[in-house]
Image (cartoon, rainbow, N blue to C red):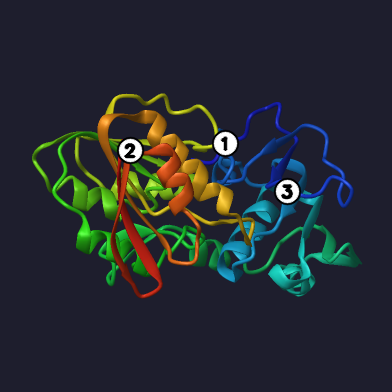
């Protein structure tokens, strides 16, 4: 049942540029992409004074977050939502007016910044929340939610890795586990003793817990660029690492995954990694591992097996 911390007066979704929007007093972070954040879904209706959102780029995900934020506000409460113009910003004002809000709109630094007031009776909140909520979809036969990476289809990189993944054994981890598709394949081997599923997206972790019903699996909402979770002496790591951060290509993400895998594996342990073929991961792989074998190149992706 939705509830609100009595000390919570406002919510913050994401990390909007501080020079574009002022942080409301007493704001609690609610982004699913910042580990440790509160769940916006759990904040009670009409309980807050203000909300500040760096709106997500995906239409369904963005409308879901906007609807949830409006729902949390008291009538007359203030919502500031902003986004880059090419990542949903130009649609924000229209979407907020569609919820019945009075809106002012301004453009600054390639962003659109909308300030809205929550009406006494917002319109269309329930359909927007329903459209962005978790659901089971038949083509994956998995629980999923809009906003998660490859939420409604099997990513071709993961599909390639699945076709070339050998039977694994011992203790391992799935870095960037998503919905748990790789984890389910790994756990088909009875020789796997334990598998840590790690993702920066809370929604992915919640869905992976539903999709991977195996007592050998543990799910961790964590940013692999940090120290958590504490892992060591693993026999294997599987990964389809992200290479975008906030919509921009960031090759450092994959390089971080490679370095973290090397750090947590035992001597002789293996990393099974798939990546877009254009990404220059060979050098960091060879710097971190004793041997690196390109397994296959197909459809714009490469699979590597790296041994520590």
The answer to which image quadrant residue 107 occupies is: bottom right
Q: Sequence-wise, which precedes: disc 2 or disc 1?
A: 1
Q: Sequence-wise, which precedes: disc 1 or disc 3?
A: 1
Closer to us: mark 2 or mark 3? Answer: 2
Q: Is residue 155 visible?
A: no
Question: Alpha-carbon neighbours of circle 1 within 10 Å: few (<14), some, or many (≥20)?
Answer: few
Above or below for 270 versus 136: above
The residue that disc 2 covers is: 290
Q: Is residue 143 visible?
A: yes
Q: For numbered disc 2, what is the local secondary structure?
A: loop
Quadrant housing the C terminus: top left
x 57%, y 48%: residue = 252
The numbered mark at residue 73 is 3
- Whether label 1 touches label 3, CB < 8 Å: no
Which residue is at the front of the view, 140 or 25? 140
Above or below for 139 versus 257: below
The numbered mark at residue 206 is none
The residue that disc 1 covers is: 3
Which residue is at the front of the view, 33 or 289? 289
Image location of residue 79, percent across then percent down: 79, 53
């Amino acid at each position: 049942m939705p509830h609100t911390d009595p000390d919570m007066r406002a919510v913050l979704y994401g990390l909007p540029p501080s020079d574009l929007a002022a942080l409301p007093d007493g704001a609690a972070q609610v982004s699913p992409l910042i580990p440790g954040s509160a769940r916006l879904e759990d904040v009670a209706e009409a309980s807050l004074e203000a909300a500040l959102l760096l709106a997500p780029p995906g239409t369904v995900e963005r409308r879901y977050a906007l609807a949830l934020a409006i729902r949390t506000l008291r009538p007359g409460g203030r919502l500031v939502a902003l986004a880059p113009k090419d990542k949903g910003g130009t649609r924000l004002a229209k979407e907020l007016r569609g919820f019945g809000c009075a809106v002012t709109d301004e453009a600054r630094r390639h962003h659109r910044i909308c300030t809205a007031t929550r009406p006494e009776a917002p319109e269309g909140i329930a359909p927007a929340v329903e459209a962005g909520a978790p659901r089971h979809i038949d083509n994956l036969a998995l629980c999923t939610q809009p906003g998660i990476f490859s939420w409604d289809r099997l990513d071709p990189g993961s599909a390639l890795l699945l076709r070339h993944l050998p039977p694994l054994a011992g203790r391992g981890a799935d870095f960037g586990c998503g919905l748990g598709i790789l984890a389910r394949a790994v756990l088909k081997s009875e020789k796997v003793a334990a598998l840590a599923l790690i993702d920066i997206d809370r929604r992915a972790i919640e869905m992976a817990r539903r999709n991977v019903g195996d007592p050998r699996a543990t799910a961790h909402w964590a940013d692999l660029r940090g120290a958590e979770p504490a892992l060591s002496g693993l026999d294997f790591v599987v990964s389809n690492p992200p290479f975008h951060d906030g919509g921009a290509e960031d090759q450092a993400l994959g390089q971080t995954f490679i370095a973290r895998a090397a750090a947590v594996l035992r001597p002789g342990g293996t990393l099974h990694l798939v990546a877009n073929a254009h990404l220059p991961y060979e050098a960091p792989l060879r710097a971190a591992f004793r041997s690196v074998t390109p397994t296959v190149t197909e459809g714009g992706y490469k699979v590597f097996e790296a041994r520590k």
